[in-house]
Amino acid sequence: MYGEVESVERISQGMIRIILGGGELNGFVPAPFADQYINAYFIPKGAPYEAPFDLEQLKEVKSGFQPRARRFTIRKWDEKSKLMTIDFFTHGDQGHAGVWAQNAKPGDRLQFKGPNGSYSPDSTADWHLLAGDESAIPAISASIEAMHSSKICIAFMVVDSPEQEISLQSDAKLKLTWLHRSKATEPEAVLLEAIKGFTFPSGKYDAFIHGEAAEVREIRKHLIRDRGVDKSASSISPYWRRDHTDEEWRSVKKQWLEDQRKEDEASLPK
């Protein structure tokens, strides 16, 4: 399936919002999750094909020209207009997806598979905890917007500087804290320390925590060991890993998750 770029807007210093329409989006069926995502395919410069393409036929194309698959949260799907909004966090000239987003213009095509997902706010929870870095902002934003007005939502989001913050709207009773690495003595621990220092409300809660692998792992251990989070009602896992390319991270993620499972068991009270 593919869509065509309808508009491009920079919504913060590092975030570009792209709205897709047309193409094959009339046949798009959304997933029943707040964090629904697609696997998008980005075509390397100089590749001898364009979207839409047949992935099976491209197996004969040289490896350097194979499309690069990247996972992106659907920030918003408008069923009436058949428009899909995706927010891209960019890193200058790094990464296939970010470079594509920075150069996107109306009429450009983006091919993808999906959607899929795993998390929606637990309607039986008394309150919700959401935390993450730039990679999780779209999913956290969509989840916050999906919450009922009677719910309490506590959110922590870490970015490099205030210029990378975005505007969010929610009917829920939202307490949003932006954290900045540029002001922290230990940038890699800023999210964990904020959660540790927060006084949790009483009652049942679920959690959505996503971001860099090592940071998420430490937060997960804290929530399981010290806060008694219900893992079955939460989504706590990494989107990326520091000093790893996307391909490198995918190659070790399965083992990382197995190690995390063992750590979860060790963190539980005996």
Image (tube, rainbow, N blue to C red):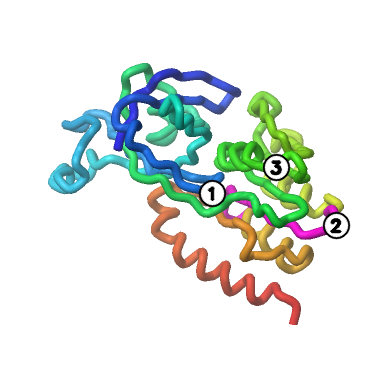
Q: Nearer the viewer, residue 259 or 125?
A: 125
In space, the residues marked 3 and 1 are separated at their CA atoms by 35 Å
* Residue depth check, mark 1 versus mark 2: number of the one nearer the observer: 2
Instruction: Give x and y (percent) for residue 84.
Output: 44, 30
As helix, strand or loop, the secondary structure at mark 3 comes to: loop
Quadrant including the N terminus: top left
Q: Is residue 101 visible?
A: no
Task: Please report the residue visible at 78 percent of the width from the left and 63 percent of the height from the top.
Answer: 227
| Quarter assignment of residue 126 | bottom right
Task: Please report the residue visible at 76 percent of the width from the left and 38 percent of the height from the top.
Answer: 174
Task: Please report the residue visible at 39 percent of the width from the left and 58 percent of the height from the top.
Answer: 251
Q: Nearer the viewer, residue 31 or 101?
A: 31
Instruction: Give x and y (percent) for residue 65.
Output: 23, 38
Instruction: Give x and y (percent) for residue 9.
Output: 51, 19
Instruction: Give x and y (percent) for residue 199.
Output: 86, 52
- Indicate the amino acid at tag 3: His
The residue wearing badge 1 is: 242
The residue wearing badge 2 is: 202
> Which circle marks residue 148 in the picture?
3
* Residue depth check, mark 3 versus mark 2: number of the one nearer the observer: 3
Q: Which residues are magenta?
A: 200-215
